Image (cartoon, helix red, strand yellow):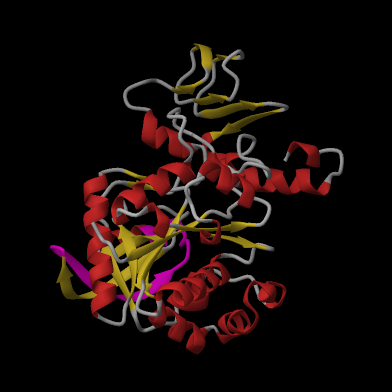
Amino acid sequence: MNQSLIPVILAGGKGERFWPLSRKHKPKQFLSLDGSGKSLLQATANRLSQLTGDAQKLWVVTSAQLADIVREQLPHLPPENILAEPEGKDTAPALAWSTLEIAKKYGEDAIVGFFPADHWIANPEAFQQTIEAAAELAATKNAIVTLGIAPDYPSTGYGYIEQGEATDTFGGLAVYKVTRFTEKPDRETAEAFLATGKFSWNSGMFIFRAGVVLAELKTHAPEIINPLQENGVAAYSQLSKKSIDYALMEKTQLAYVLPAAFGWDDLGDWNALERLLKGDAANVELANHVGMDTKGAILYSSDENEVIVTIGLEDVVVVRDGNATLIVKKDRTQEIKQVIKTLQDDPKLSQFL
């Protein structure tokens, strides 16, 4: 149990690829996707609170539009630990502002961890061991530690981290200097990465000392950190929209990767439910479903009084929620974001977002 870690949950995402269940007023991180009744945000908060042993140390950064639902789902959080962004500017401003606020309260030697709200984590003991090792590394040296996920297929939807030589061992886990980050490669490149055995998926989880990241942002992203230091959240309108990978991690010489020793999924779209829940069944059914000659389907309904009936379907996703129904081939779920754009651009259809 790491008493010094200050965990921050990034909970401002839109979760568009889980439409129609994920919508503007209640995006993916506030939903229960596995039938447990516990939202992704609540599961993440519980996991991190168990790690620190002090739920009062948990912070959440989200959008102003979603702050109320964060308070509703995590009523134990001190009000000042919920940071509400006036507008979404991606992960770099969120991380920079959060780190500044934590440094004010706990000092620049505070060990800060950033964790997306929508990840699924297996093996909680291994997760704890990995985070403790990362926190020990961050406390020991000037390091921005990222957790790498061992790839089990040549994904084109994840960023990749190339690891250099092993530098240390913490908590029984080897730590490597980062050689480079690569954003979402094509399949041929992804296959070549896997063949080397030196690449991990970029999990989007980071652990560091607050002062280390603030200094690195001063060097590599002054256009983000300087306005925030001068004007706080009021500076958001001045900030450009940048991911922390682009703004800092691809430029810093202090990046280290700790290969994760636990099961992980980023729950990026509806296909994630099949990876987590299918087992030996013909279909993933989170609905009342009557199927004839249907296999490889993912079926979800938010209303237990409804039924989904399928005949002769294969490898499809069928989702029913309120006033919207989605039917899509599983290999085209990434295109849901394009449909969202169409709905946004049509005043008659925007009500369905």
Residue 316: percent from the left, percent from the top?
A: 54, 28
Front in this rendered view, residue 234 or 215? 234
Residue 163: percent from the left, percent from the top?
A: 28, 71
Q: Is residue 13 left or right of residue 349?
A: left
Q: Residue at x 16, y 63 (%)?
A: 171
| Residue, far left | 172
Q: The N terminus is located in which quarter?
A: bottom left
Q: Residue at x 16, y 75 (%)?
A: 168
Q: Is residue 315 above or below residue 255?
A: above
Front in this rendered view, residue 210 or 275? 210
What count of labels does the image hold?
0
Residue 30: percent from the left, percent from the top?
A: 55, 42
Q: Is residue 322 above or below residue 190?
A: above
Q: Which residues are magenta?
A: 171-190
Front in this rendered view, residue 172 or 48? 48
Front in this rendered view, residue 293 or 345? 345
Q: Is residue 198 visible?
A: no
Q: Is residue 312 visible?
A: yes
